[in-house]
Amino acid sequence: MKNYIITGRPGIGKSTLFNNIINTLRKSGIIVGGIKSPEVRDSKGFRIGFKIIDLMSNEEGWLAKRNYYSTIKVGKYGIVLDESSRIIREALRKALEKADVIGIDEIGPMELKIHVFRTMLEQVLNSDKPKILVIHYRLRDPSILDKIYRVENEKYVLTEHNRDLLNKVLPQKIVMEIKQIIKK
């Protein structure tokens, strides 16, 4: 199957493009499952953590919180292991069973520290379903990268110069291609 890969430096608009693609797929009647992990900011604009959201049910919980005590830390963020693991497991299980397309925003060092994410990601990457994957620009995990790139891919590196154009044309292009793949 095919992977559509979105990458680029932090703050460039990867999640915006991902959300545009997911929304366009849904409007076309394509069932999308998976997860996204948006940042959460306080009233002063400071990032305080990351949520984890199930794309099918919209259930959400904490992925990581700033200064949160956890046995798993990434920088100043502590992973909220029980909550994030439960949502990740259920969201990706449902996506594998029921979705036409699987989306993950993002595959990065924080998410890969969670055993359940790594295990479920391997199942997702081994599935025949088309995937929309946001990949952290510094991801260097050889086993995960090998699984991602062993199938046909279209990789998009977002920059200040191409992000507006990609947000205009890529969602519809992907819908047309995926409709051909899944025959919807």
Image (tube, rainbow, N blue to C red):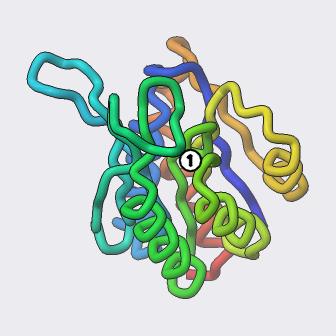
The spot of residue 109 in percent (x, y) is 63, 37
User: The C terminus is located in which quarter?
Assistant: bottom right
Quadrant assignment, res 167:
top left
- Asked if residue 13 lies left or right of residue 112, the reply is left
Which residue lies at the image location 75% right of the left edge and 61% below the top edge?
A: 2
Packing grade of label 1 (10 A; few <14, some 14-19, many >=20) is: many
Whole-percent x, y for residue 144 in the image = 79, 50
- What residue is shown at x 29% (from left), y 60% (from top)? 60
Position above or below: 98 against 101: below
- Residue depicted at 26% across the width and 35% down the height: 40
In-image side of 141 versus 34 (left or right): right
Can see residue 78? yes
Name the residue at the top extreme: 161
When the figure is inspected, residue 75 is found, relative to residue 93, above or below; the finding is above
Would you name the residue on which mark 1 appears? Answer: 111
The single residue placed furthest to the bottom in the displayed view is 97
Name the side, left or right, on which 110 lies relative to 47. right
Q: Position of residue 17 (x, y in %)?
A: 45, 39
Tell me the quarter of the image containing the N terminus.
bottom right
Three-letter amino acid code at the position of disc 1: Glu
Q: Look at 41% across and 67% down and name the residue there.
A: 87
Confirm whether residue 170 shows in the render. Answer: no
Horizontal side of 79 relative to 143 (left or right) equals: left
**Figure label count:** 1
